[in-house]
Image: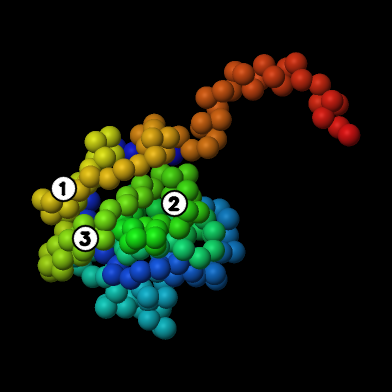
Amino acid sequence: MEKFETFTGTVCAVDRANIDTDALIPKEYLRSIKRTGFGHALFSDWRYNADGTDNPDFILNQPKAKGASILVGRNNFGCGSSREHAVWAVAQQGFRVVIAPREGEIPAFADIFRNNCAKNGVLTIELSSEEVDQIFKLVEADEPLEATVNLEEQKVVVGGVEFAFDIDPAVKEKLLLGMDDISETLLNEAEISAFEDTHDPQLATA
């Protein structure tokens, strides 16, 4: 997994709440577990017409969202089934960050989606509803909207407006170091090898 570094990218804002994992990647794309080739499937039911052509009304197909790497949605983003393919599709489309708001007791992100993002190098940023409303106002312009994300300083600057965000320190460290669960485990490789050299596997049998 690549280290997460400060970057500036284009914003793509999808003004819908409760975007579930079936909307992110419909079930017909779940046949493969190769973890590649899912970018084109992101939002496919909204992104494409019945004949497979691009739907010009969907934001991802509009010029101002071309090459976007920062995805903004409404609350409860990534709800639904636990399919990790949804995050693969988000990442393989080129999105490195997903921003959503918490509204009272309604979360910004579904827990499983948030965890899957962290494991795949995608940063989830939770802002207030008012802050996300500001971003949606900024993105109404016809020109592309740029934002700069600085994970180290925990801030995102959108169209010149700065927003601070909180993040779990452990998740922050993993993203900054580019570590997934396997990489984290391998930090203890010497101890694991030493244990395997002295451990009698027969002791584990019933």
Mark 2 neighbour density, 10 Å: few (under 14) some (14–19) many (20 or more): many
Element marked by disc 2 = helix
Does residue 42 sit above or below 155 in this rendering? Answer: below
Colour pattern of the rendering: rainbow
The residue at the point 40 percent across, 68 percent down is 18
Residue 117 drawn at (x, y percent): 43, 49
Tell whether 93 sits left or right of 120.
left
Q: Which residue is mark 2?
A: 114
Q: Which mark is residue 162?
A: 1
Position of the N terminus, as image quadrant, is: top left
The answer to whether residue 36 is seen in the rendering is: no
Name the image quarter holding the C terminus: top right
Is residue 198 visible to us here?
Answer: yes
Q: Secondary structure at mark 1?
A: strand
- Please provide percent x and percent y for residue 81: 54, 63
- Which amino acid type is shown beneath numbered disc 3? Glu
Q: Amino acid at mark 2?
A: Arg
Label 3 SS: helix
Q: How many numbered marks does the figure carry?
A: 3
- What is the x, y in percent for residue 29? 53, 67
Sooner in the amino-acid sequence: mark 3 or mark 1: 3
In the picture of the structure, the residue carrying the numbered disc 3 is 130
